[in-house]
Image (spheres, helix red, strand yellow):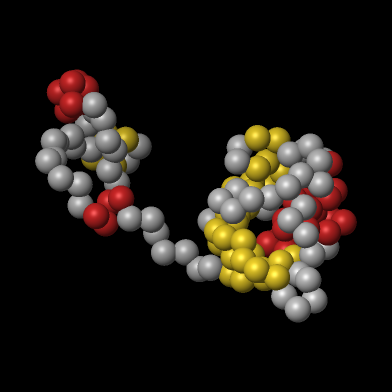
Amino acid sequence: MYAFVLEDKLDFLAQELHQAGSFSVRAEPCETVPERVLAEPDRELHDTTVSSLRADAVLAAMMHTSRTLAAQAISGGKVEINHLPLHSAAEPVYAGDLFTVRGAGRWRVKEIGGTSRKGRLFITYFQY
């Protein structure tokens, strides 16, 4: 694991931080950051269709549940979008939105595609 700190704090961390939990820790400067450190982990992308870009419809599709149960989770205060509480099931959803459902997991809408012949919208998402 890597942590990025300001250069003037490196000496302090090197002197004071030796262990985090049961893991030993060392602090050392580096001129360049390896790409594997900054690379986003590979996630399995899922494609689905939704009837609209309402929060309850998108959440139901990502959770593989009914729209009614998704709306109940929203009205029960269990759902956040981008770390902000979601108060309305009719809230619009945009590409990049992060859904957090307390007790169920997290999903991110990766992209919103075109429409099907029946007028449904294609979305791509992944689960953390």
- Residue 44, position in %: x, y? 50, 68
Q: Can the viewer see residue 34 in this picture?
A: yes
Vertical placement of 93 versus 17: above or below? Answer: below
Q: Could you say which is closer to the camera, residue 16 or residue 67? A: 67
**Which is nearer the eye, 65 or 25?**
65
Quadrant assignment, res 121? bottom right
Task: Count the marks.
Answer: 0
Q: Position of residue 37 (x, y in %)?
A: 28, 51
Q: Eyeballing the image, is 3 above or below 13? A: below
* Residue in front for this viewpoint, 18 or 44: 44
Residue 57 location (% of width, % of height): 78, 58
Residue at position x 27%, y 35% from top? 4
13 displayed left or right of 71: left
- Identify the residue shown where x is 84% and y is 55%: 69
Residue at 64 percent of width and 50 percent of height: 94
Tell which residue pokes out farthest to the right in this image.
68
Question: Where 4 sits versus 123, above or below?
Answer: above
Whole-percent x and y of residue 59? 72, 56
> Residue 10's quadrant in the figure?
top left
Residue 64 in sight from this viewpoint: no
